[in-house]
Image: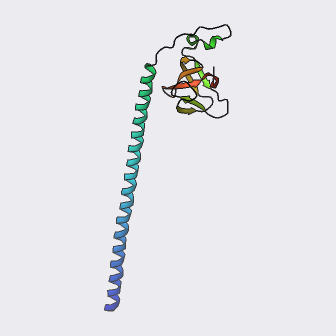
Amino acid sequence: MRKKDHHIVVKIMFGMIVVLILLTVGYSHVVATQHKTIKLRREQQERMRREQEIKNMQSMASIKSVQPQKLQIRNNSQSDTENPQSLKDALFVTRSTSKMSVNVRKTPGKDSKIVKKLPNGVSVKFLSKEGNWYLVSYEGGAAGYIHKSQLAK
């Protein structure tokens, strides 16, 4: 081999080594970035889980602070299902009258803030009654008001 050819072969080999080093560094960077992304996702999921637990605990605390409702005098046209005593711990199922979701509200009344939209067929537990509104618990202890027309026993 001539010196010139030998010199070209050395340059090509050197170039290939540099390219391999760059590819290795790039691959290492990609792998490290993926590991960081996975770690951040797990941390975010854990943080969201803890926040949800705190919200659930706050909801349960608010359920305990609900005062018992006074019994209303019942006339003969009212059925037994409207007597709060007969409804204690009763289970109801959400029933939308408009084939949409059932609104769960912060306080009784159609102008109250909607805190959750439940689909048809969700089981809820009766806690108390205020007029035509039932305070119910749902989804692990969260609570809110649903109009009695949106519930079925």
Work out whether 135 lies above or below 35: above
Above/below status of 24 relative to 94 = below
Figure quadrant of residue 14: bottom left
How is the protein colored in the picture?
rainbow
Left/right of residue 131 with respect to residue 10 in the rendered view? right
Residue that sits furthest to the front in the current view: 111
5 and 39: which is toward the camera: 39
In x, y percent, where is residue 1?
A: 34, 90
The answer to whether residue 22 is above or below residue 120 is below
Front-lying residue, 6 or 78: 78
**Quadrant occupied by the C terminus:** top right
Q: Residue 71 versus residue 39: which sits nearer the camera?
A: 71
Give the left or right position of residue 97, taking residue 19 as reference: right
The x and y percentages for residue 5 are 35, 89
Whole-percent x, y for residue 75 in the image: 65, 8
The residue shown at (41%, 47%) is: 41
In the depicted view, which residue is nearer to us: 143 or 18? Answer: 143
Picture coordinates of residue 111, whole percent (x, y)? 56, 30
The number of callouts visible is 0
